[in-house]
Structures are given as C-alpha cells and as structure tokens.
C-alpha cells in the first residue's frame, strides 16, 4: 500500500528538538523532554518529546491544518516542525481550530528565540509579529482565566517583559469588568494584529484613558488605569478610538517593536518627521485625537529643535504630545523638555 505521508527524516527530527532545547513549545509548559534512565546498570536516554508537523504530513484533507497549497519539500523540512511533549502534541492535533498554523509558527519562533537568548545570556531584542488570534469574552466566573489564557498564548513575558505581561493581563480584566458592569456590553473581543493587542466592545463612547483617570473615586478599573499609566508610561502605549458604535483600545510596546510599526498603530494620531528635513511645515491632525505622537528626525541636534514648532501648536490645542527620539543625550532631552513643556519624551531603540 502506498504511503502518502511526508515524514520528517531522523536528522530533521533531531534538529527540531535541538533548536527548541528539547523543551515543549506549548505556553506555560516548557517541559524538558529528554533525560536519563538506568536499566541493568546502563545509562539510557529517554525522550517524551515529539517533532510535530505544523502543516500535516498526510494528504488527507480531514487532518488538522491541511493545506493543499503547501509544497512537499516544505512539509518535510525543519521549518514545518515544532517540538512538543507527548500530551501537547496530541492536543494541538485534536483542536486545530484553536491551534492554527499561524499560532504554532509563532510558538515555534518564540521557543527557538528563548533557547538562543538563554545560550547567549541575553534578553530578546528582536521584533516578533503576533499571530492573528482572537478571543470573545463574556461575563462569567471564568473571565479572569480566559484573559490569562489569551495573554499566555502570546508569550508576552518573553516579548514585552514579565511585569508588563502581568500588568496587561490585569488591565484587560479590569477593562472587561468595566465594559460589562458599566458599559452594559454583552461581550468583549480581544484580538491581535501584528504589533498590537486590541480590546474592543460595542456600546456608547467611553474612553477609559480619560473617563477612568478623571473618576473621583478610584477603585478597580480607575485605579488600574492610573497606576498602569504611571508605571508603563514610557514602555507601553495605549491608544483609544471610537467608531461605528465600537470602543477600541490598542495596546502596543515600543520596547521590541520597530518605531515605524508603532507609528502605524497610532494612526491617524501620529506624525512621522523622519522623512522631512524641512520640519517647520504645517501639519494637521484629526480633531478626535486627544493624544498626538510625533516621531522626531534621526540624529536630532539642539539647533533642530526650534523647527519642531508643531509640538507647541498641538499643546495649545490642549492635546497631549508624545515626542519620540532615538540616540539622544541627556542634554538634548533636557532641552526638549524645556522647549516643549507638557510633552512626554519617549526614547526608543532602533531595531534591525
């Protein structure tokens, strides 16, 4: 009988295991899958790890994540493999609607970067695109758990930092409870694009960044938004929008995200001056923007600062201004703060 499976070779299986450090790639598992056993006074190696196909090895269209367009050479290559413990190897094939190819490729990349960083004793400094995943949250006793599962799926601790990861989880929980208790929402959706987590629900306009911060009695959500803004003001960016009866809050980080992609997430409330040497030109912004984010030209000097007249113009219109600079000395940042009182200076790192 003809075998239609496109299996990994022994060498490819070994490579998939080695690249993951023989750790399970499933979030919050990371079980070490290889170890020693002793039998008849002889040391042997025992493995409970599996080199799993992301796109399946079989041509059966009923199998998890089947895609007829994927070439056979790719199917049997290391690029199509993810290392799992035996339990999670079965789980990702039993529930392919939850464990999509996009999500598994993301987990594979995170797992391999974690091992590389561990070997080099360094932290992640690469931009990593989020998988396009979403979760619909409804009022229930499982609300906190469902949101924690969603943030764990994204490996936020590895990408944006452990404290940031926990704080974002807690912020999403408080925002969801506020949407249900005060916004009368029937459900909220938390999903991702490549560079941001997006919190969204249908209801009357309610900007938590303003309404909750101005709340006289700060409990729960109001206190969380206030503390989050204080602690992560120069690390995590929150952007609110309201359109077509939907409240939307975007959460992104400038720590491991290319600055151009951050500016894209902040549109239409962002202004990129890096392509303008004549930066005194007049700019306009949508009136609905309560905050405006300005990307300053690279290698800014003190003599250039006076040309960024846009910052003061926006401040006069009572808009909060964030000014993004790179490779700036304490002297330059001090001068910026002196010239543009009220602006928030954000120093970012250029990523490859």
Image (tube, grey):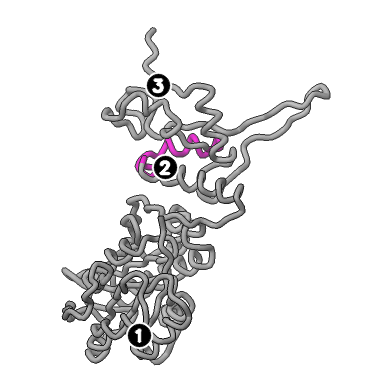
Relative placement, left or right, of 317 versus 132 is left
Instruction: Identify whether 271 is placed above or below 352.
Output: below
Name the residue located 39 percent from the left edge and 80 percent from the top edge.
345
Which of the pair 335/243 is nearer the observer? Answer: 335
Q: Residue most toward the top?
A: 1
Could you say where residue 288 lies in the image, as x and y percent from the top left? 19, 79
**In which image quadrant can residue 169 be found?**
bottom left
Does label 2 or label 1 sit earlier along the sequence? 2
Q: Could one spot residue 281 in this view of the protein?
A: yes
Asked which secondary structure carries label 1, the reply is loop
Instruction: Write down the region rendered in magenta.
Output: 84-101
Could you say where residue 209 lies in the image, as x and y percent from the top left? 34, 80
The reply to whether dot 2 and dot 1 touch (C-beta < 8 Å) is no
Asked which secondary structure carries label 3, the reply is loop
Does label 3 or label 2 sit earlier along the sequence? 3
Name the disc covering residue 6, or none. 3
The reply to whether dot 3 and dot 1 touch (C-beta < 8 Å) is no
Q: Is residue 91 magenta?
A: yes
Does label 3 or label 1 sit earlier along the sequence? 3
Name the residue located 47 percent from the left edge and 62 percent from the top edge.
160
Q: Is residue 49 magenta?
A: no
Relative placement, left or right, of 114 versus 322 is right
Which of the pair 84/283 is nearer the observer? Answer: 283
Name the residue located 22 percent from the left edge and 88 percent from the top edge.
313
Q: Tell me the quarter of the image containing the N terminus.
A: top left
Name the residue located 47 percent from the left edge and 38 percent from the top edge.
91
Residue at the spot of label 1: 343
Nearer the viewer's eye, disc 3 or disc 1? 1
The reply to whether dot 3 and dot 2 touch (C-beta < 8 Å) is no
Local packing at callout 2 (Cα closer than 10 Å; few below 14, some 14-19, many 20+) is many
């Amino acid at each position: 009988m003809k075998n239609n499976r496109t299996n990994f070779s022994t060498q490819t299986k070994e490579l998939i295991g080695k690249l993951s450090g023989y750790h399970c790639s499933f979030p919050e598992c990371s079980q070490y899958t290889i170890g020693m056993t002793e039998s008849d006074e002889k040391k042997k190696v025992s493995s409970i790890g599996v080199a799993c196909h992301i796109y399946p090895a079989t041509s059966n269209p009923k199998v998890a994540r089947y895609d007829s367009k994927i070439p056979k050479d790719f199917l049997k290559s290391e690029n199509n493999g993810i290392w799992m413990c035996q339990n999670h190897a079965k789980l990702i094939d039993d529930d392919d609607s939850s464990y999509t190819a996009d999500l598994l490729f993301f987990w594979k990349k995170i797992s391999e970067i974690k091992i590389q960083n561990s070997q080099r004793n360094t932290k992640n400094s690469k931009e990593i695109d989020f998988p396009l995943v979403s979760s619909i949250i409804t009022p229930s006793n499982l609300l906190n758990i469902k949101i924690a599962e969603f943030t764990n799926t994204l490996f936020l601790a590895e990408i944006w930092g452990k404290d940031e990861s926990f704080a974002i989880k807690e912020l999403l929980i408080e925002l969801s409870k506020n949407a249900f208790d005060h916004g009368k929402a029937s459900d909220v959706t938390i999903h991702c694009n490549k560079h941001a987590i997006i919190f969204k629900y249908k209801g009357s306009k309610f900007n938590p960044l303003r309404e909750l911060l101005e709340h006289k009695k700060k409990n729960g959500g109001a206190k969380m938004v206030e503390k989050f803004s204080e602690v992560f003001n120069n690390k995590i960016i929150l952007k609110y929008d309201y359109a077509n009866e939907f409240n939307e809050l975007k959460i992104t980080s400038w720590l491991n995200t290319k600055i151009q992609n951050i500016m894209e997430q902040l549109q239409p409330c962002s202004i990129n001056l890096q392509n303008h040497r004549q930066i005194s030109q007049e700019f306009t912004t949508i009136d609905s923007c309560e905050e405006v984010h300005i990307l300053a030209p690279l290698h800014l000097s003190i003599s250039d600062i006076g040309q960024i007249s846009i910052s003061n113009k926006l401040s006069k219109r009572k808009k909060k201004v964030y000014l993004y600079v790179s490779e700036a000395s304490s002297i330059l940042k001090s001068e910026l703060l002196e010239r543009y009182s009220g602006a928030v200076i954000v120093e970012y790192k250029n990523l490859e």
